[in-house]
Amino acid sequence: MRDPLIRQLSELPLVEPDRARTAHVRLRCHARLTRTRLGESVAGAPAAPDRTSQFWPPLLATLGVVYFTEVIVQALRVYGAP
Amino acid sequence: MSRAGLPGVSTAMDRETELALVERLRRGDADAFDDVHSAFNTRLFTFLVRLSRRRDVAEDLLEETWLRLVTRASRLRADTRLGPWLFTVARNLHISYHRSRVLEDSASASLWALWPFSQVRSSPFEATAASELERRIERALAAMPAASREVLLLVGVAGLEPADAADVCGVTPEALRQRLHRAREALSRLLDEQDAAAEAPAPRGRTSCATR
């Protein structure tokens, strides 16, 4: 798409932003990149094992087995062994 | 700054380099950011400053564009095309800025004013234009509605391919072609009007300056 008018537009000069501000923006972006990278590395690290949370599942399973065993024993006592 | 020999945005870097940079950006590589910044900073600013016609606004929008990139760097898609991505963000930021300005100005607070049509304002580049033609084009661009100006800036000045400019504007390629055609016609008309105004004989007996 190179009609003469578009070509004339393409020949308009580029405009440079303020250099001091450009340097400031660059530093600010570097800082944010670092913060983002550190934040994600902390978030992605595996959590330390929680001993309290590891305690409950086996306890509940044991209580469940004890409960159903007692149910079966009571049922056999009431209805007699087959 | 001269444009002689500089590639357009769509060809500022080859695809392999671009993909590698995106991958490094996703990992938070500051050197990759510097490479992208060097490749696109001036072009983005050129687009924003001609779109907004204010250097201070363009500087703010440019900074915000880069901050958006680094904030979202880790979430970039691996096949991201940086040029269209950056120009999309820059354009959207300008639209948001323009709408917020219109809403703040109670005299312009109307639904019609929410569309980014701009009031006629002179271009800050007229005074520094290297040639008469350049001055005329800058003046005509500044006089156009922002919606028309942006498509000419994306395709003509920034050098985006029409398909990429369509992505930036959020329209289909066909719609972009139509918009570009209308914008091109409008620019041509404005340039002709300038020619006619320049050739019109000065009215006799009047000393007042004509204002536009």
Image (cartoon, rainbow, N blue to C red):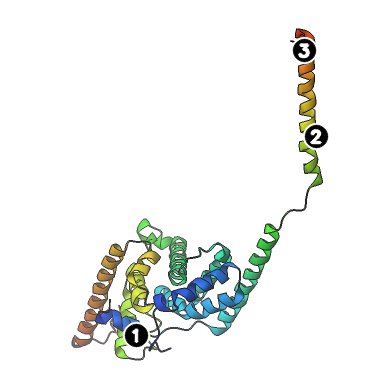
Secondary structure under tag 3 reads helix
The amino acid type of the residue labelled 3 equals Leu
Residue A6 placement (x, y as % from top left): 29, 79
Residue under the point 35% across and 73% down: B161
Secondary structure under tag 2 reads helix
Residue under the point 25% across and 69% down: B182
Mark 2 or mark 1: name the one nearer the start of the chain. 1
Labels 2, 3: front one: 3
Q: Chain of mark 2?
A: A
Relative to residue B120, is residue A12 depicted above or below?
Answer: below
Residue B148 placement (x, y as % from top left): 32, 69
Q: Which sits in the foreground, A17 or B135?
A: A17
Pointer 1 local density, CA inside 10 Å: few below 14, some 14–19, many at least 20: some
Mark 2 or mark 3: name the one nearer the start of the chain. 2
Q: Residue furthest front?
A: A82
Label of residue A70 in the image: none
Label of residue A76 in the image: 3
Residue B94 placement: quadrant: bottom left
Marks 2 and 1, how far apart in space?
77 Å
Mark 3 or mark 1: name the one nearer the start of the chain. 1
Q: What residue sits right under mark 2 in the picture?
A: A59
